[in-house]
Amino acid sequence: MGREIVEGEKEGEELLFVPPLNFAMVDHGVFRSGFPDITNFSFLETLGLRSILYLCPEPYPESNEAFLRSNGIKLFHFGIEGCKEPFVNIPEETVREALKVVLDVCNHPLLIHCKRGKHRTGCVVGCLRKLQRWCLSSVFDEYQRFAAAKARVSDQRFFDKICIPAPG
């Protein structure tokens, strides 16, 4: 008995599992990536996601919302503007609220994403790392692995200055 053909798949073809740009596991039940599109949906289904934390201000595309509905995934939308300008403040309160979602295991498995999975996602993950008591140099190293040549000093200053109270 063969495997059931999945929508969009032709008989005799293998289903491709393509992760979104900059996909990685952050912690048990927490993942990060760039913006997923239809080519990533079969991969995302394998994660058994319960929630998605979306960090861009733009509305979520209808195709993505349909994917969420069909998979029973809850969307948490925290619209953080992409700030390329130096000294533009990252909204600390928004990041704190996003962290509450990340820390609530009832939302796991959870995917955190923005457009490219670099800056906004990197800021939320960097703050999570501070909560996990990572040393700042390790937080910077992880951020730079994803941001690469696009690393922003303003984001790194944000990790350094933000005061994250311990949960509880």
Image (cartoon, rainbow, N blue to C red):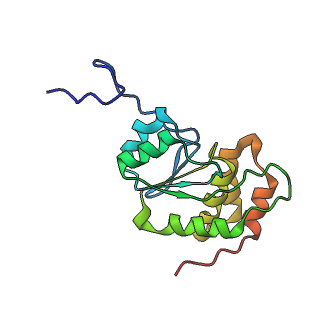
Quarter assignment of residue 67: top left
- Report the side of 25 relative to 143 (left or right): left
- What residue appears at the point 73 percent right and 50 percent down from the top-left corner? 82
* Up-down relation of residue 117 to residue 14 (above or below): below
- Please tell me which residue is depicted at 76% across the width and 41% down the height of the picture: 149
Residue 44 point in image, percent of width and height: 43, 43
Residue 6 location, quadrant: top left
Give the farthest residue toward the right. 86
Q: Left or right: 78 with respect to 47? A: right
Residue 64: image location, x then y, percent: 48, 42
The residue drawn where x is 70% and y is 75% is 163
Task: Report the residue that reaches farthest toward the bottom.
Answer: 168
User: Percent position (x, y) of residue 136?
Assistant: 70, 64
Q: Is residue 43 above or below residue 161?
A: above
Q: Quadrant of the N terminus?
A: top left
Residue 122, relative to residue 164: is it above or below?
above
Instruction: Tell me which residue sits at (40%, 56%) in the image.
Output: 50
- In front here: 63 or 2? 63
Q: Position of residue 57 (x, y in %)?
A: 65, 52
Query: Does 139 sit left or right of 72 as displayed?
Result: right
Residue lying farthest to the top in this orientation: 12
What number of labels is visible?
0
